[in-house]
Image (cartoon, rainbow, N blue to C red):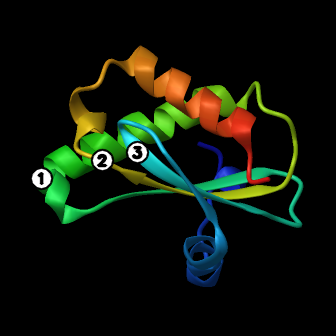
């Protein structure tokens, strides 16, 4: 994921967590919030309940890659997104992660 497309500042992440609209899918939960920036920025997290560090990193990488592939086709609207991986993200087929990511991006923050 390119550097500009990542949501990095803790106050931006906290704002998305506090006021963002939650959308649930089988492999992750995404919180979306409209932004003044004309790009889609994303932060991916994985809690310790998912498993060991290796498993959490794998879940984050898979979810991040699914969104990276789908961001190319998304419009340039300003959206900040916080995605929390769930345990299903590790074993889910990558095609289902792609379709879930695409549906989240189509739905938008409203």
Image coordinates for residue 18, horizontal then vertical, percent: 58, 79
In space, the residues marked 1 and 2 are separated at their CA atoms by 10 Å
Classed neighbour count for the residue bearing mark 3: other residues with Cα under 10 Å, few (<14), some (14–19), many (≥20): many
State the residue position of label 3: 28
Residue 99 in the image: x percent, y percent? 53, 22
Q: Which element carries disc 1, helix, strand or loop?
A: loop
Q: Is residue 58 left or right of residue 6?
A: left
Residue drawn at point x = 42 percent, y = 20 percent = 96
Front in this rendered view, residue 95 or 18: 18
Identify the residue under disc 1: 51
- Which residue shows up at 30% across the image and 36% down it? 89
Is 101 situated above or below 19?
above
First of labels 3, 2 by sequence position: 3
Assess disc 2: are there few (<14), some (14-19) or many (≥20) residues with their C-alpha within 10 Å of its C-alpha: many
44 versus 106 height, above or below? below
Image x and y of residue 50, in percent: 18, 52
User: Which residue is painted at 89% across and 67% down in the image?
Assistant: 36
């Amino acid at each position: 994921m390119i550097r500009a497309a990542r949501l990095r500042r803790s106050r931006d992440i906290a704002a998305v967590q506090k006021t963002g609209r939650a959308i649930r899918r089988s492999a992750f939960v995404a919180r979306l919030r409209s932004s003044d920036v004309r790009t889609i920025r994303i932060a991916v997290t994985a809690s310790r309940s998912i498993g060991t560090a290796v498993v959490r990193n794998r879940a984050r990488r898979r979810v991040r890659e699914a969104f990276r592939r789908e961001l190319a086709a998304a419009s340039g609207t300003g959206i900040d997104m916080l995605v929390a991986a769930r345990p299903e993200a590790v074993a889910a087929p990558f095609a289902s992660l792609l379709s879930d990511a695409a549906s989240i991006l189509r739905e938008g923050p409203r």
